[in-house]
Image (spheres, rainbow, N blue to C red):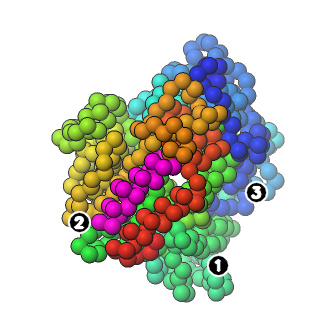
Amino acid sequence: MRSNKLDFATLTTPFEKDHAPYAPYSMYPRPLMVRESYLSLNGSWDFTVINGSAHKFEGKITVPFPPESKLSGVLRSIQRNDVMVYSRSFTIPDNFNKGSILLHLDAVDQTFVLKINGNTAGTGALPYLPHTFDITALIRDGDNEITVSVIDNMDTDYPYGKQTAKRGGMWYTKISGIWQSVWLESVPEKYIEKLLISADTEKVKLSVVGGEEAKTLSVATPYGVEEYSFLGDGFEFSPKNPRLWSPEDPNLYYFTLKCGEDEVKSYFAMRTCGITEKNGMSLLALNGKPYYLHGVLDQGYFSDGIFLPATPEGFLNDILKMKACGFNMLRKHIKLEPQLFYYYCDKHGMIVCQDLINSGKYSFLIDTALPTVGPRHGISHRASEKSRKLFFEVSDGIVERLRCHPSVCYYTVFNEGWGQFDAGGCYKHFKALDSTRVWDTTSGWFKTKHTDVESDHVYFKKIKLKNVKGRPMVLSEFGGYSCRIDGHTFNLTKNYGYRICKTAHDFERDLTALYENEIIPHAKEGLCCSVLTQLSDVEDETNGLLTYDRQVLKISPKRMRKISDEVFSAFCGSFGGDK
């Protein structure tokens, strides 16, 4: 148990006071397709950990927090061959009378078997992605029993991100089991199974899977409700005087879609992201104009829930504090979040550069040490057929899940070579899957010509970037300056960072100098994206703008906002476009 070790501190975030232990994350978890019928199964479950004939743990767990976290109430590391058995009872609400009952498991790590009233309802083996099961035939009157049996053997053929069984340095505590919402909804016999909304600066295309033939669409606009009726599974329309989405004006159009007995609420935004040419440079563009992505690396780890904050306010706090510092982008680093996170980014105007999630063996020598000091080309990786297959399955699911979020403008396929294979083939696959976003095939090193951008990581050295014709210049990681704040540090004896700042004053001074001396001059010359490491401290790492418990911001927001304005002014002074 992590908290019993003397060299680790138990850190409390500001959101724990609002955490309702028996009903966490009780809001509707799918903001892009909301129904009236909804029952959250989050909260207290019976929880047993079995290894062979041995019962290693019997007690309660608070879902959806992983058992390794403080908020779960378990705070226990799950070992290979452990079987986690979750169970609880539930009663179907009276308003669940439309036809079918769907059960959603939004994320389980790694493999699971679902049973309802002792009968197998389904299985799952894609961590990070949601699973939906029709359990209508298994439901009975009165109390029903749900059981989810999970195994997490940390099989590295599965995408796993920054989690590891032996945490330390830039590797973090692994999580296991259920780590996103479990919930039920009632749907009619013919129901809307999926919505796909794509939009540019002029028109919107709506694609519908499932439901009755006749549909009615009601869109709320500044000029009143625009209503459309159509038949079939596709419809295009153009709102009057479209108001485009951007971080400066994150306008969302909310709508209702009625389809026979089914009705869902959703939203869309009008915007484009891509690449443009200006003054002989290839630049990132938003809505057709040069645009500077000024961002921070966002690992998505929290001191209390590890993969989740105590409440969704934790996500919102990160987004709004970075906005207050002048940032307009988060690079979501090798992790997929619940949809609520992306909705908050859509709503509040924070661009997301989304990483796909690496799998396969990691080599410190090949993936980090050698490329940091010199060789960044010609090193090949071998990925098993199983890891390749799982990488595509999970990655395709991520792209599908995020396709309708306007905040998601940019994807990274491979980060610093972890699990990298057939980079050119992967670029072609994903670009064909979603051509409306920018694709960074190899962030950092081990580069390929099959990519939309020239993407570099620079630590320990002075930043010197080269312009490559046809590719926007992206600094996808830099900084990593470490500053420990007493009373807000997870590891009391060890520290990890790329430059030590003894005080917050030193941290602000050195960070200011880094931007003024190295980022701003490059912005004048065509650098159009920079990603500071990082948003928050994570375990041993103390290189965040925020402490791991989100209690302390190490730099004055006013000072950081001034730096941000100088970055935007340098870029716009050379290339125009919007801030």
**Distance CA(mark 3)–CA(mark 2):** 57 Å
Question: Is 105 in front, or is 160?
Answer: 160
Q: Which residues are magenta?
A: 508-534
Placement of the N terminus among the 4 image quadrants: top right
At 46% across and 56% down in the image, what residue appears? 295
* Magenta span dominant secondary structure: helix
At 68% across and 41% down in the image, what residue appears? 13
**Relative to 18, is 147 on the left or the right?**
left
x%, y% of residue 187?
67, 58
Tell me whether circle 3 and circle 1 mark residues in contact (CB < 8 Å).
no
Q: Which residue is mark 2?
A: 470
Mark 2 nearby-residue class (10 Å; few <14, some 14–19, many ≥20): some
What mark, if any, has residue 220 been given in the picture? Answer: 1
Where 268 sits versus 444, above or below?
Answer: below
Where 414 sits versus 341, above or below?
Answer: above
Could you tell me which secondary element the residue under label 1 belongs to? strand
Q: Residue 531 lies in magenta, yes or no?
A: yes
Question: Is 149 in front, or is 489?
Answer: 489
In which image quadrant can residue 574 be found? bottom left
